[in-house]
Amino acid sequence: MRFEKSKGFRGTVRVPGDKSISHRALLIAALTPGSSRLLGLSPAHDVAATKGCLQQLGLLLEESPGLTRVMGRTLAHWRESSGALQCDNSGTTMRLLAGVLAGSSFSATLVGDASLSRRPMQRIVEPLALMGGKLQATGQGGRPPLMITGSKLRAVDYQTPIASAQVKSALLLAGLHADGVTRIREKHPTRDHTERMLRAFGAQLSFSSGYAEIAGGQVLAPQTLAVPGDISSAAFFLVLAAATPGAELVVENVGLNPSRTGILDVLAAMGARFTIKPRHTEPEPTGDVHIYGGTLRGFSVSGADIPRVIDELPILAVAASVATGKTVVRDAAELRVKESDRISALLTELSRMGAKCEEYPDGFAIEGGRLSGAIVDSHGDHRLAMALAVAGCCAEGATYLRGVECVAVSYPGFFSALKRLLGGTEGEHA
């Protein structure tokens, strides 16, 4: 796919429903007796994997435009699947569903595609085993397939060795079916979508920055919930607008959960100008972001700030490449175990475009300047594909991006939305 440098543009976009929230809404609605209505779920292939697994487990989902009705049941009434549960490319599906099924009364095998089969699963196997769960990651080095024999769980007080919302969420969902009160303490605070979603469905739990606890044995109540726009998807448009002099963009009804708005904090540190118009506060804060193009400067991010920008670091690296000054990212080794090694792959492709990059075991440094068109590859990683597309829109000369089909994992309509925005039709929605 071909891209050229964009000029100042004006427009409005509305990105699809948040992928992280969509997974959690589906799983928790499925554990809730009765009919729940979920509005605006993400169309991502990853979310479709969660739906498919729930259907394999005997749950009924009814789909209509913009609405998914979930006929939930308590876990005791879920049905054992006749075959392996297909998680496709979705680590969130596999890890969170494992937390649920650890406390079931049956056995299950969770499998994924080639990419997911390379991702680490011991990070959930070990703490769930402390709760009495019987799980085994049978792939080399503790990787999928994941075999689960449902068992009676007991509460645990657990300190996470890595900052992972998926690990925390797996333990909270297991804790919902465990005897006693499960407590999770985090090395660094991570996104709290699971806690908010459980509370929205009537669960009694306590949570604060870096801490969560839940009592087992609770029965949830069905709900009607709307999923806000995905800020991780919005990030690509926000960076493109911020890095394009004369551009002006409004991203409507996007999720503004403080655990996910690190992208806005970094853009502010880079000198980007934007305003926020709040819309809702519960169960997730949402609003409109109005951003203006200009000149950006380099930034530094590390430590406790990394979990708040972990998914946005690829597109922020593009911003760093066209900014003035140096950018340094540390404590982000988690990037190496995503759909690709996002540190190595990203720097390889940005270097092809002329970026001056230095690779660290846990991050990178980029000396800002300018990008030039080149032939680049997505490495089969949806976030790299979208980041490199934006890089092509910031580069001098034509950029050719290979492997664009992988964007369907999180944002199937991304390229169409980008084309409409740069076509200059003000007010058009993506």
Image (spheres, helix red, strand yellow):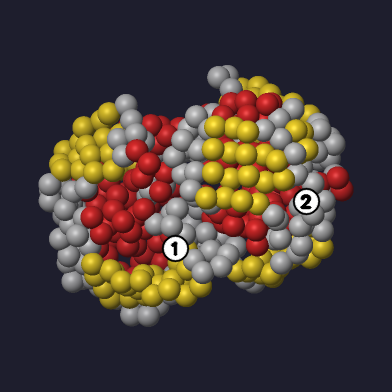
Residue 11: % across, % down: 33, 75
Classify residue 305 by image quadrant. Answer: top left
Picture residue at 31% right of the left edge, 39% below the top: 302
Numbered mark located on residue 76 in the image: none
Q: Position of residue 268 (x, y in %)?
A: 25, 59
Q: Amino acid at mark 2?
A: Gln
Label 2: element kind: loop
Spatial CA distance of label 1 from label 2 is: 29 Å
Query: Which of these two is toward me, 137 or 114?
Result: 137
Question: In the depicted view, which residue is nearer to us: 194 or 137?
Answer: 194
Which of label 1 and label 2 is nearer to you? 2
- The structure residue drawn at horizontal position 63% and vertical position 44%, both measured from the top left corner, is 213
| Residue placed under numbered mark 1 in the picture | 256
Residue 15 in the image: above or below residue 135: below
Residue 15 seen from this side: no
Of 321 and 45, the residue lying toward us: 321
Position of residue 399 measured from the top left corner of the image (x, y, whole percent): 25, 51
Q: Which residue is mark 2?
A: 218
Say left or right for 370 vs 57: left
**Could you tell me which residue is drawn at 28 percent across and 43 percent down?**
301
Q: Residues within 10 Å of mark 1 (few under 14, many from 20)?
A: many
